[in-house]
Image (cartoon, helix red, strand yellow):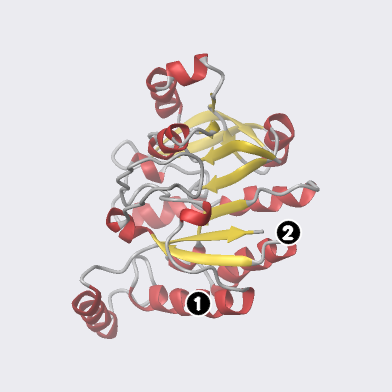
Amino acid sequence: MNENLIIDAGMHVGQDTAYYLDKGFDVVAVEANPVLARAAEERFAGAIAAGRLRVLNVAVAERTGTASLSVSDDATIWSSLDADFVRRNEAFGTRYRTVDVPAVRFDELLADVGIPYYLKIDIEGLDMLCVRALHRFDDRPAYVSLESKVSVGGASYADAFDELAHLWALGYRRFKYVDQRRHPEIRLAPPAREGGYVDQRFSEDSSGPFGEETPGVWRPFPVAVARGAALWSQHDLAGFGGRREHSRPAATYRRAHTRLTGRALGWYDLHAAL
């Protein structure tokens, strides 16, 4: 494991990559959308020239070759290879076009760039391709995060449990579900617990702090399973794309949640630590 390396799988517009660079880490950023990859190469030209950043314009897929990427120009964060993910978003009015992009298996990518200290995964519906690839290696990232199925409309609880099960099998023993909607509330105080200190302001679309700077308490596997089941049930009842989203009980639940917490229902990243 390279203790100074972070892989940003699903770079999007680069706000996470910029944060990791500012904290002093080297970064390999993976972005399938060629428009976003080119913009990142211009934005981060200095870091690339200094050897601190590689931008890989590839899609993570089941097979190496060429893949048809569904790109939303209106909601670039929702570009994906996952047909189910795309159909869900189209049902809510998101418009897509397709573009052929280079594709690579994530185990091949890891064999090229090495095992990172932190692996951030957010590739819109196919995050588990990256997690499963880790089984092919003896070393593991110290920390992993992915966009969890507990808050993805149409996902089954088996999908959510599968995330925890694979991470457990890989040797991860500490877990957190982090509400992405609460990221703007986070203020990190010095000294830094990961890399150098950065007075960062996080957006809902960012992956937020990582490692020992993530908010909340690390939980053991059984507690994480129970928490995941509760979050999945909440989303299935009242979340975006949930099966009962438009029911009267769902509307009542959302109003009560907003009154009690002061915010709407969120979506969750699952963080895991060795």
Amino acid type of the residue tagged 2 in the rendering? Leu
Of residues 131 and 115, the one nearer the viewer is: 115
Relative to 217, does residue 129 appear above or below in the rendering?
Answer: above
Amino acid type of the residue tagged 1 in the rendering? Arg
Where disc 2 sits, the SS reads: loop
The residue singled out by tag 2 in the image is 170
Relative to 228, does residue 189 appear above or below in the rendering?
Answer: above
Number of numbered markers: 2
User: In the rendered image, which quarter is residue 16 located in?
Assistant: top left
Going 63% across and 74% down the picture, which residue do you hit?
221
> Disc 1 or 2, which lies upstream in sequence?
2
Residue ranking furthest to the front: 191
Of residues 149 and 174, the one nearer the viewer is: 174
- The Cα atoms of the two marked residues, 1 and 2, are separated by 20 Å
Quadrant, the N terminus: top right
Q: Is residue 134 left or right of residue 146?
A: right
Going 44% across and 79% down the picture, which residue do you hit?
233
Where disc 1 sits, the SS reads: helix
Q: Residues within 10 Å of mark 2 (few under 14, many from 20)?
A: some
Q: Residues within 10 Å of mark 1 (few under 14, many from 20)?
A: some
Residue 237 pos. (x, y %) = 37, 78
Q: Which mark is residue 227?
A: 1
Residue ranking furthest to the top: 49
Going 52% across and 43% down the picture, which residue do you hit?
81
Residue 69 pos. (x, y %) = 49, 37
Quadrant, the C terminus: bottom right
Going 65% across and 52% down the picture, which residue do you hit?
131
